[in-house]
Amino acid sequence: MPGLAESGGQIPGQRFIEPDVLTRIDNLELVARSVVDGFISGLHRSPQLGMTMDFAEHRAYMPGDDVRRIDWRVYARTDRLYIKQFEADTNANLHLLLDISRSMDFGSGAVTKLQYAKFLAASLAYLSKRQRDRIGLITFDNDIVDMIPTSIRHFNRVLHTLDQLSAGGPSEYHRPLEKIAKQLRRRSLVVLISDLYESPEQLLSAIIQLHYRGNDLIVFHLLDPLELSLDLGQVSNVEDLETGVAIPIAVDEFRERYRQLVGEHQAELERRFGANQIDYIFADISQPLDHTLFRYLSDRVRQNRIR
């Protein structure tokens, strides 16, 4: 996207907020406001959380409507007054789906994946609140843990729940996502935030259920830098956070093959999700949060143009 992608993923003149700075702010709403307000100030137009201002449909003119929105061409053909409606005119439903399984509790630096996920979810919720969208939150590990239905009044409830979250049990995608899909009774924007520790085939099988009823689906894939590099020094054992089992490993011999496998996993997820019109955003949790939001927005604009 000219002016966005060509800038190397950065907003001209924008000062990004590093994760370690966010951890010092002891208020999740203040974190979200700091990230989103600063993020928006670096853009030339206000983002609509992936929803463009493209024309959507007509509706009959009602007394009190802005006459500037009347479609006079339609009036000339039908002798009736109709108003142009745009995508941003209708409040959207935003469902935030957050993986709180044990593996999300890992972090080698300033934040864990779960902390970063909280910051990201809070920022998306705040961005939606600015647009008066209905906001809901569902957390899960091997089953649904918290479920807050979408409402324009649920922003504070969502933030409170996010603030109190801790990592839970082992991860399992199919069962909780199947239950969640059945709860999505009207078309929604569904944002899944997870470290996606499962085979691409199994993940797609679980996540595709959320596409029912025409939901628009975005997946944020969070990983810690250490999970990308395997720079463990002379460590000879690693612990599986899901099971607690210690696994012997010859790091020096396995590192390059490990990095290759991680890269292949990301590429296959992006390919499979893209083929099913699921937006995939990868995020290294050492990167600034507003940088991740910017990548999300630029990808959404690009996808909207393609679709």
Image (tube, rainbow, N blue to C red):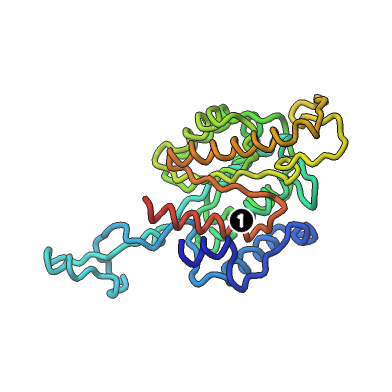
- Of residues 196 and 48, the one nearer the viewer is 196
Rendered image quadrant of residue 72: bottom left
Which amino acid lies under the numbered mark 1 shown in the image of this protein? Thr
State how many labels appear: 1
Residue 156 percent across, percent down from the top left: 64, 56
> What's the residue at 28%, 64% (across, down)?
84
Residue 66 percent across, percent down from the top left: 31, 73
Residue 225 percent across, percent down from the top left: 73, 46
Q: Is residue 287 left or right of residue 93?
A: right
> What's the residue at 47%, 33% (across, down)?
209
- Of residues 116 and 14, the one nearer the viewer is 14
> What's the residue at 79%, 41% (across, down)?
231
For label 1, count other residues whose C-alpha is less than 10 Å away and answer few (under 14), some (14-19) or many (20+).
some
- Of residues 193 and 9, the one nearer the viewer is 9
Q: Which residue is mark 1?
A: 292
* Vertical arrangement, residue 241 with respect to residue 42, above or below: above
* Vertical arrangement, residue 164 with respect to residue 3, above or below: above
Rendered image quadrant of residue 295: bottom right
